[in-house]
Amino acid sequence: MFERVKKYAGMENWACQLQAQEYDSNPMVAPTIVIKNAPRGPAGTFSILGEDRHKIKITYNPEQVKNPEILVATYAHELGHYLGMTAKNYPPGGEAFWEPATDLLATFMGFGIFLANSAFSFKQYTEVNSQGWSTQSQGYLSQYELTYALVIFCFLKKIPTSEVEIHLKRSLHSFFKKATKEVRGNVNALNKLKKLTVL
């Protein structure tokens, strides 16, 4: 899957090493006892090994193998770091904004649906002795910010938004339609963006 994401990103020849992280500890210590706010490892990491900027390591949380959509979003974000490090300047706002800018970069690399769908998830569970729910956030931009960026990407690439909306999770459809209407009505800003971007 990682090699496929690299290929779709146009980075199949960019050398890097992929490694699974340690598994997170299980927050359920007994059938009816769950540790609240148990620490979790990061979704993924990007690091340069030593002095050589061409030795790159990307890691991922092995729990994500159960959810390929989240795993693709993680791979896209970490590959976005790799691509972003070739930039000569910091993103707008400075170095502190690298992570949100990397989410945007991954969206404009073509993985916006994956990022928007996995930015926030709600899950219910029922087992023999317990039941409950959990929420999880991933990435640095909200699901709405990523959806808005996805709409802009569609307009810049001339991709019909109807072809994208059907792949978004249902809870984002209403916002996607509002964002589409707003972006469509802002032709001047879109034209300025077209002059600044090469997609």
Image (spheres, rainbow, N blue to C red):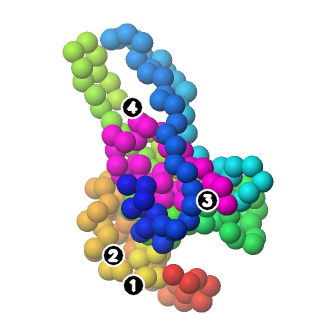
Residue 95, compared with residue 60, is above or below; it is: below
In this rendering, which labeled residue sits more in front, label 3 or label 4?
3
**Residue 191 place in picture, x, y as percent:** 54, 89
Q: Which residue is mark 2?
A: 161
Kind of residue sitting beneath label 2: Thr
The crowd level at tag 3 (other Cα within 10 Å; few <14, some 14-19, many 20+) is many
Residue 113, compared with residue 58, is above or below; it is: below
Label 3 vs 4, first from the N-terminus: 3
Residue 1, compared with residue 131, is above or below; it is: below
- Secondary structure, mark 3, is helix
Label 1 vs 4, first from the N-terminus: 4
Q: Is residue 14 left or right of residue 183?
A: right
Q: Is residue 191 left or right of residue 130?
A: right
Work out whether residue 156 can be spotted.
yes
Q: Which residue is mark 4?
A: 134
The crowd level at tag 1 (other Cα within 10 Å; few <14, some 14-19, many 20+) is few
Report the Cα–Cα distance between label 1 and label 4.
37 Å
Report the Cα–Cα distance between label 2 and label 3.
27 Å
Q: Which mark is residue 81?
A: 3
Residue at (47% x, 17% y) in the render: 35
Q: Magenta segment, which residues?
A: 54-80
**Residue 71 place in picture, x, y as percent:** 41, 49
Kind of residue sitting beneath label 4: Ser
